Amino acid sequence: MRPIQNAGGEECICARSYPVAGATAIAAGQVVQLSAGKVVPAIAAQTGAILGLAGEDHPGTADMLNPRANGDEILVCDNPGLIFECPVPTVRAESGSATTLVPAAGDVDANAADGAYSAAVLVLRSKAAGSANTDRPGTRRAVTDYAKSGTVLTLETGGTAAAGDEYELYPALGSAVCALNAKATALVVSATGATAVRCIGHDYERHTIRCIAAVHTLAARS
């Protein structure tokens, strides 16, 4: 994850020091949370509040050139309104029609609820060898529905996806249907559960999505 700006529009990204266990390994840009008063990485199925993004590397092992490498403090970009970005998740087609696409097994979480990816946008990234798909790379297709049974994405009418065609999947704006990857550095659609992170922007030219904390440790609570 990479911090972009704050929700108020200001581009100054501030970071503050928080306690961390000396042996805890955290990479700059990793989504983090507080546990027992210390910073730890967020988990893939993160549903609890996040603190923000790690503002520095803390490998958790001694480094003669970096005394903070296994120190007891780490910088965290902790603004509740912090906007950050990551690469857009991708899916491969297993089959399709002019109005549907079935992702390859495991590319989309089979446990995602009906309608989970409705209002998402698919962008054709590349075609498999021999693909007869008439859409050109870069073509955008709105997702109008999702059926859990068979993991079927219903799309606006277009070319028929062939097995192996690769698509970028931009989640619906405002949704929190994706999970963090194992390192908590990006979002994936192969799992669900990261309801603490919400998609708020699509950057089709840079192939990224923009996110904000849906549940933040420092946010005011009603």
Image: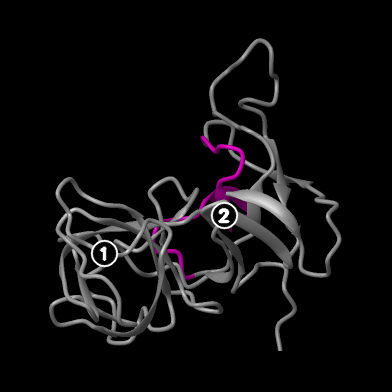
Viewed as shown, does residue 91 lie left or right of 84? left
The residue at 72%/68% (across/down) is 218
The residue at 30%/76% (across/down) is 158
Percent position of residue 216, x then y: 64, 69
Viewed as shown, does residue 176 lie left or right of 113? right
Q: Is residue 36 visible to us here?
A: no
Secondary structure at badge 2 equals loop
CA neighbours of label 2 inside 10 A, class few (<14), some (14 to 19), many (20+): few
Residue type beneath disc 1: Thr
Secondary structure at badge 1 equals loop
Q: Which residues are magenta?
A: 25-47
Q: Which residue is mark 1?
A: 134
Secondary structure mostly seen in the magenta stretch: loop
Q: Quadrant of residue 204?
A: bottom right
Position of 83 relative to 184 (above/below): below
- Tell me the tag on residue 205: 2
Position of 119 relative to 167 (above/below): below
Colouring convention used in this rendered image of the protein: one colour
